Amino acid sequence: MYKELLEFIIKNLVNHPDEVFVDETTTDEKVKLKVKVAKEDMGRVIGKEGRIIKSIREIFYAYGSKAKQKISVDIEEIKD
């Protein structure tokens, strides 16, 4: 559910959408989303002073609070 939304957002930000991978891990009270993007796209996802990733995290915080779940979004670059 959250994975598809995050994938959609990230793929529309980056230059290499085919290299975007999202992994969703769910426990009782927390959903952990891990995003992997190409090294060249890290800056596009993080944004200046981290503004873009902060905004993405706020969207998921608000979305998760309606379902009474905590959601964390982490980003990693794809290793060669």
Image (spheres, helix red, strand yellow):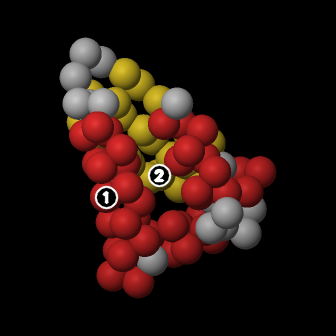
* Relative horizontal placement of residue 69, taking residue 8 as reference (left or right): left
The residue under label 1 is 58
Q: Can residue 80 be seen in this view?
A: no
Q: Which of marks 2 and 1 is in front?
A: 1
Image quadrant where residue 55 sits: bottom left
Which one is in front, 32 or 70?
70
Image quadrant where residue 37 sits: bottom right
Mark 1, residues whose alpha carbon is within 10 Å: few (<14), some, or many (≥20)? some
Q: What element carries label 2?
A: strand
What is the C-alpha distance between the residues marked 2 and 1? Answer: 19 Å
Q: Can residue 65 be seen in this view?
A: yes
The answer to whether residue 54 is above or below residue 34 is below
Q: What element carries label 1?
A: helix
Image point (59%, 57%), residue name: 10
- Type of amino acid at the residue the image marks with label 1: Glu
In the displayed orientation, state which residue is furthest to the top.
28
- Type of amino acid at the residue the image marks with label 2: Glu
Label number found at residue 35: none
| Residue 69 place in picture, x, y as percent | 26, 31
The residue under label 2 is 76
In the displayed orientation, state which residue is furthest to the front.
66
| Residue 67 place in picture, x, y as percent | 30, 31
Image point (44%, 53%), residue name: 75
Which one is in front, 8 or 49?
8
